[in-house]
Amino acid sequence: MRLGHHLYTDGVVCSDRHETKMAILCMLFLILVIFPHGLQSSNQHSLHIQEAGKTGEITVKYTVIHDLLCTSSCSHSLPLTVPEGDTLLQIMESAQKEKPAYFGFTKTETSLGTFITSIGGINGSTKNRTYWQFLNGAVPIIVGVAQYKPSNGEHVIARFSKY
Ligand code: B12
């Protein structure tokens, strides 16, 4: 009786260990299937895009957001492959050519350079204290669009904002 119980207990322990081993093996297999190239950092991802493109070209994502005034379909994005060294203004011109309704813009020349006055038919206004703000991801760009040169893999955002 006692011996049998002992053997039975051992049997359960043995089977528990076997199940744990199988579960670990299954998890390792799943990780290999989901991340065949390992967990890449965004830098490595950008590098991958650069390698995939022609030499001297970069890929940027350009998004226009006007959620100050609208409640649905307030954002439009475009992936663009452009010559390396293009300014944001030149990239905006490429986007304008592709989809003028969403990315068409107007500008004015000032002593500081080019100032963007409207995008997609939406005008900034001194009276309402609104303007088109430019960001690299979540970070506001500190120069004008004619001076700024986005990097490969960058997400440039033009957001209708208040000041
Ligand atoms: C107020 C201000 C703004 C206001 C102007 C609105 C208004 N009606 O007052 C708003 C919020 C719209 C603004 C926007 C931007 N600004 Co600003 N702005 C200033 C600030 C703080 C004061 C300008 C001012 O009133 N001068 C006094 C008046 C009497 O002189 P003014 O020549 O008439 O001023 C006009 C120009 O400065 C113009 N303006 C303002 N900003 C910019 C930016 C660019 C690129 C251009 C061409 C013109 C311009 O608007 C002013 C009013 O009409 C300056 C910093 C400073 N201390 O100078 C930064 C400054 C001029 N802005 C700057 C920047 C980078 C921008 C943005 C590009 C920021 C962004 N990430 O989007 C945007 C422009 C985007 C676009 N649509 O093209 C930089 C320009 C740097 C450079 N060498 O290119 C400065 C120097 C700040 C900095 N980074 O140090 N700005």
Image (cartoon, rainbow, N blue to C red):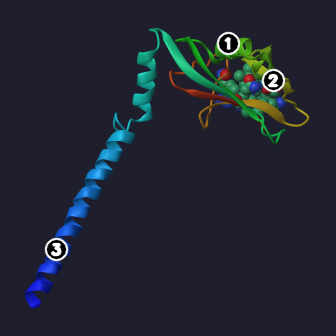
Decide: marks 3, 2 in contact (CB < 8 A)? no
Name the residue carrying label 2. Answer: 120
Q: Secondary structure at mark 3?
A: helix
Figure check: 24 above or below 129: below
Label 1 secondary element? helix
Q: CA distance from mark 1 to mark 2?
A: 14 Å
Residue 112, given in percent of the width and then of the height, sits at 72, 18
Give the residue at the far right of this rendering: 127
| In the image, residue 3 above or below residue 162 | below
Q: Is mark 1 within 8 Å of ligand 1?
A: no
Q: x and y percent of residue 88 in the render? A: 64, 18
* Amino acid type, callout 2: Gly
The answer for how far apart the CA atoms under marks 3 and 2 are is: 72 Å
Residue lying at the far left of the rendered structure = 3
List the residue tagged with mark 1: 94
Query: Which residue is found at the position 47% from the left and 14% from the top?
Result: 53
The amino acid sitting under disc 3 is: Gly
Where does the C terminus fall, quadrant-wise? top right
Dot 3, how many residues are within 10 Å of its Cα: few (below 14), some (14-19), or many (20+)?
A: few
Give the alpha-carbon distance from disc 1 to disc 3, as whole Å. Answer: 70 Å
Amino acid type of the residue that numbered disc 1 sits on in the rendered structure: Ser
User: Camera-side residue: 84 or 37?
Assistant: 37
First in sequence, mark 1 or 3: give its number. 3
Q: Where is mark 3, residue-wise? A: 11
The 10 Å Cα crowd at callout 1, few under 14, some 14 to 19, many 20 or more, is some
Which is closer to the viewer, label 3 or label 2? 3
* Residue 46 pos. (x, y %): 45, 26
Residue that appears at 61% across and 14% down:
87
**Disc nearer the start of the sequence (1/2):** 1
Picture quadrant where residue 69 is located? top right
